[in-house]
Amino acid sequence: MPEKKLYKNSKNKKIFGVCAGIAEYFNIDVTLVRILCIAAVCTFGTGILAYIIAALITPEKPE
């Protein structure tokens, strides 16, 4: 079985592709991940920082 890795998804990205990459990694709908990300930003406030860090450290998906 191939090893799963988390990548930013450049085909389905809105800002940096982080949410699309997470959705692809866990095999769930990208809209659900985006809603959860927005909820984290609105409720905790640390969601923006987490998203920026993820955008910086997550590699682009090789084609």
Image (cartoon, rainbow, N blue to C red):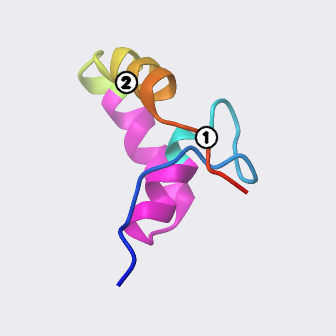
Labels in figure, total: 2
Residue pictured at 38% horizontal, 45% vertical: 36
Q: Residue furthest bottom?
A: 1
The reply, left or right, for residue 44 in relation to residue 16 is: left
Question: What residue do we see at 35% from left, 69% from top?
Answer: 3
**Magenta highlight on residue 32:** yes
Which quadrant of the figure has residue 46?
A: top left
| Residue 14, image quadrant | top right
Residue visible at 49% across and 21% down? 56
The residue mark sitting in front, 1 or 2, is 1
Question: Residue at point 47% right, 59% down?
Answer: 23
Side of 18 relative to 39 (left or right):
right
**Quadrant in which the N terminus is drawn:** bottom left
- Image position, residue 30 (x, y; %): 55, 58
Mark 1 residue element: loop
**Which residue is at the far left?**
44
Q: Label 2: which residue?
A: 41
The amino acid marked with disc number 2 is: Val
Q: CA distance from mark 1 to mark 2?
A: 23 Å
Question: Nearest the camera: 6 or 19?
Answer: 6
Q: Is residue 5 magenta?
A: no
Q: Secondary structure at mark 2?
A: helix
Where is residue 62 drawn, in percent x and y?
A: 66, 52
Position above or below: 35 against 2:
above
Q: Which residue type carries mark 1? A: Glu
* Disc ID at residue 60: 1
- Of residue 33 and residue 27, the one placed in the foreground of this image is 27
Question: What span is in magenta?
Answer: 20-40
Predominant secondary structure, magenta span: helix
